[in-house]
Image (tube, grey):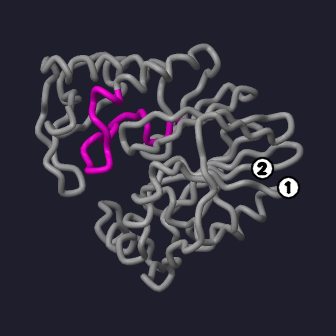
Amino acid sequence: MYFSTEKVTQRIFRIRTAFEVCAYYIQGEKSGALLDTGLGCGDLKSFVDDLATTEYTVILSHGHCDHAGGSSQFEEVYLSPLDEELEKKHCSKAFRIQEIQAAPTPLPQTWRSEQVLPQRTSGFKQLTEEMFFDLGGVTIELMLVPGHTKGMMVFLIPEEEVAVFGDACGENTLICFPESVSIAEHYKALNKLKQWDGRYTRIIRNHGTFESALHLLDNNIELCEKVLSASDVRLPIEVHGVKAFAAKDRSREMTEKEQTGNIVYTLDKL
């Protein structure tokens, strides 16, 4: 089975996939919302239909294939127009099969390339940070946080005191792809995200441990400052075939708080 679920709060559910990425489902009294659709392998729609108690909206955090790849199953899907061109390239069936086969984790024994869904052909509904989703007793606010991609969105569910940082700000924020913005622009966006301080008590994400400590944002802001002043560690690494640098070297001795967060970047993204 490609999907499983666990409760984050009474109204937020994490949907784990077999490919080291998760989506989130939020259930309100009047409607629900699915945040991201995974790689598009397996019948996510039927899984969410069984989980939901109402009709629901589908919202994509950004255009990468591991988040937008399953959108063809849903009639109406929201995506930032800044990431629409990225989605066209990144979510082709051939590209997603290549990404699945190149993944560092073992594939499920039942996986076959024929199970990968076709790419979405219909358009997206425009998603902007001015929008607000009222699900009935629970709401979703949005903030554009460019960095990982140009149209990267962060979600706030204030009633649950949860912020969904996703890939926008994480333990290894990847600012090293052609679709990424500069570290300077990302730094500005992270400082804007500080506007939500005090409105959430948990940070959840889509990869790795799926959750981070509250000092994540401050740590990554500080790392951006170090990168921009060339005072970071600048540890050479390779990510998805891209030769890049990590701002922090976690192999060095540091406190648990200092371990939180990192920025991975290329020199052309300064």
The foreground one among 65 and 131 is 131
What is the magenta segment's predominant secondary structure?
A: loop
Q: Residues within 10 Å of mark 2 (few under 14, many from 20)?
A: many
- Name the residue beneath numbered marker 2: 32
Identify the residue at horizontal 16%, vertical 43% (top origin). Answer: 244
Identify the residue at horizontal 56%, vertical 68% (top origin). Answer: 2
Give the vertical position of 96 relative to 254 (above or below). below
Give the vertical position of 227 relative to 3 (above or below). above
Horizontal and vertical percent for residue 253? Answer: 20, 20
Tell me the distance, in whole angstroms, between the alpha carbons under discs 2 and 1. 8 Å
The dot on residue 191 is none
Nearer the camera: disc 2 or disc 1: 2
The foreground one among 32 and 110 is 32
Amino acid beneath label 2? Gly
Identify the residue at horizontal 54%, vertical 72% (top origin). Answer: 120
The dot on residue 53 is 1
Horizontal and vertical percent for residue 219? Answer: 36, 19
Give the vertical position of 22 relative to 194 (above or below). below
Amino acid beneath label 1? Thr
The foreground one among 16 and 41 is 41
Q: Splitting the image into 4 quarters, where does residue 64 fall?
A: bottom left
Horizontal and vertical percent for residue 84? Answer: 47, 57
Q: Residues within 10 Å of mark 1 (few under 14, many from 20)?
A: some
Task: State left or right for residue 90 relative to residue 196.
Answer: left
Q: Is residue 131 magenta?
A: no
Which image quarter is the C terminus in?
Answer: top left
**Label 1: which secondary element:** loop
The span shown in magenta is 165-186
In the rendered structure, are the residues bearing label 2 and label 1 in contact, judged by CB atoms less than 8 Å apart?
yes
